[in-house]
Amino acid sequence: MLALDAYNVFRRKHEPALNCAVRQDRPVPDFVRGDTWDYAGTVQTSGQTPAGFKPEAAREATTCRGYYLFYALNT
């Protein structure tokens, strides 16, 4: 598995639908702090991804900004 295919996902504590995905080979952005975000797990684009997570958009966003914000949709 390439690092491009794996993301650490953080969930906003007071807005749990808001998630921030960071490629595993990238540093976590400064705004993702323990007082406002919880680690929610790892996403592998080769497997099942959370509803609302778009692998191609994640690849583009993390290349440009270093992180990908998305809303987890209820299924």
Image (cartoon, rainbow, N blue to C red):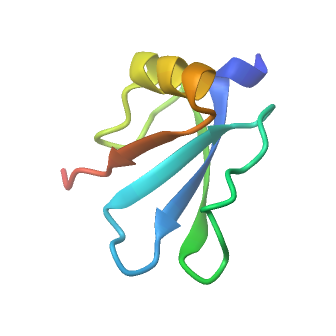
Q: Nearer the viewer, residue 57 or 31?
A: 31
Front-most of residues 32 and 21? 32
Location of the N terminus (image quadrant) = top right
**Most foreground residue, 46 or 40:** 40
Is 11 above or below relative to 21?
below
Quarter holding residue 66: top right
Drawn side of residue 71 relative to residue 33, left or right: left
The answer to whether 33 is drawn above or below residue 68 in the figure is below
* Picture quadrant where residue 37 is located: bottom right
Figure check: 37 above or below 22: below
Residue 46 showing in the rendered view: no
The residue that appears at 65% across and 71% down in the rendered structure is 33
Q: How many labels does the image show?
A: 0
Residue displayed at 42% across by 44% down: 69
Q: Judge left or right: residue 24 versus residue 68.
A: right
- Is 73 rendered above or below residue 1? below
For the question of whether residue 70 can be seen, the reply is yes
Residue at x 44% of width, y 36% of height: 49
On screen, residue 2 versus residue 38, left or right, reads: right
- Location of residue 4 in the rendering, given as x and y in whole percent from the top left corner: 68, 20
Q: How far across and how far down the image is residue 32, in percent?
A: 62, 63
Please provide percent x and percent y for residue 9.
57, 51
For residue 40, what is the image quadrant? bottom right
- The residue furthest left is 75
x 60%, y 62%: residue: 31
Rendering coords of residue 39 (x, y %): 63, 65
